[in-house]
Structures are given as structure tokens and as C-alpha cells.
Image (spheres, rainbow, N blue to C red):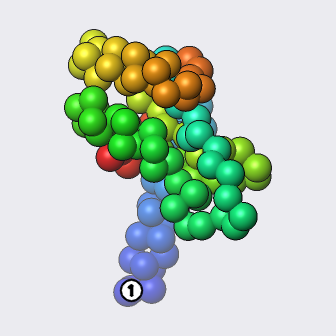
């Protein structure tokens, strides 16, 4: 008697799991919007040896904080690519990005506009 109930219980659970998996497969994937970002490339400092401070976007990170940017992302040195800072070009960031762009041009910091999908990455 108990074994029969367990068999029916297992069959019911398996059928629900199959239906849920099938529904997940046919569900259309929601396309993330593409957002424009201002990218600042960390200036290269010529030194005899690379220090830990050179591995992350210190100079451009400090520039962003000085300009009042509250939400931006930084990267580190990888595959011979310089560390970068990315800040979304949104109305909330308008004052900060205008300040960043003017100070970056004064300091000859390379900037780019890039488009990428919105992420839920940790920001600073």
C-alpha cells in the first residue's frame, strides 16, 4: 500500500518537472536593452615593474568619484588590456559624465562610447 502511494507520488512529481522544463524551453528569452556607456581607459604609467596599484583603474576611478559619480564599474588589467572605468550614459549620470569628460580631456585620458547589454553587476 505505501509503496503504491510512493510510486504515484514519484510519477506526479516527475510529470510536473517535465512540464516545467518544457515550458522553460519554449518560453521566449527576454532581450536585455543595450545601454550606452562612457568608457575611460586607465593611463599607462611607465615604471620598471608593475605594481598592484597599476592593475586596477585607480586614476579614472578617482576622477569619477571626484565628479560625484555614484554608480560605475571598473575593470582590472587582463590580457594586455588596460584597466577601464564604465559609467552608463543616463539622465541620472548626466552631471557626473559631463564633469568626467571635461576632466578626462584635460588630462588626456582616452575615452570611448560603448554599447552593451544591461547587467546586474556590482557597482561602486
Q: Measuring 46% from the left and 21% from the top, which residue is drawn there? A: 106
**In this view, 4 is above or below 109:** below
Question: Can residue 47 be seen at all in this image of the molecule?
Answer: yes
Q: Is residue 116 left or right of residue 70?
A: right
Q: Is residue 99 left or right of residue 74?
A: left
Q: Is residue 7 left or right of residue 25?
A: left
**In this view, 62 is above or below 28:** below
Q: Measuring 38% from the left and 48% from the top, which residue is drawn there? A: 122
Could you tell me residue 115's position as x and y percent? 57, 20
Q: Is residue 83 left or right of residue 37?
A: right
Residue beneath disc 1: 1
Please state which of residues 60 and 25 is positioned toward the viewer in this rendering: 60
Q: Measuring 45% from the left and 39% from the top, which residue is drawn there? A: 60
Could you tell me residue 6's position as x and y percent? 42, 79
The residue carrying pointer 1 sits among few (fewer than 14), some (14 to 19) or many (20 or more) residues within 10 Å by Cα, namely few
Question: Can residue 20 be seen at all in this image of the molecule?
Answer: no
Amino acid at each position: 500500500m505505501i509503496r503504491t502511494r510512493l510510486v504515484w507520488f514519484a510519477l506526479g512529481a516527475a510529470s510536473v518537472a517535465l512540464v516545467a522544463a518544457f515550458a522553460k524551453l519554449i518560453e521566449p528569452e527576454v532581450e536585455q536593452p543595450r545601454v550606452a556607456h562612457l568608457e575611460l581607459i586607465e593611463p599607462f604609467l611607465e615604471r620598471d615593474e608593475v605594481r598592484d596599484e597599476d592593475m586596477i583603474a585607480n586614476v579614472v576611478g578617482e576622477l569619477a568619484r571626484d565628479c560625484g559619480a555614484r554608480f560605475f564599474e571598473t575593470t582590472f588589467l587582463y590580457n594586455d588590456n588596460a584597466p577601464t572605468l564604465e559609467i552608463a550614459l543616463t539622465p541620472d549620470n548626466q552631471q557626473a559624465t559631463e564633469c568626467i569628460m571635461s576632466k578626462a580631456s584635460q588630462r588626456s585620458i582616452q575615452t570611448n562610447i560603448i554599447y552593451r547589454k544591461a547587467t546586474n553587476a556590482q557597482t561602486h
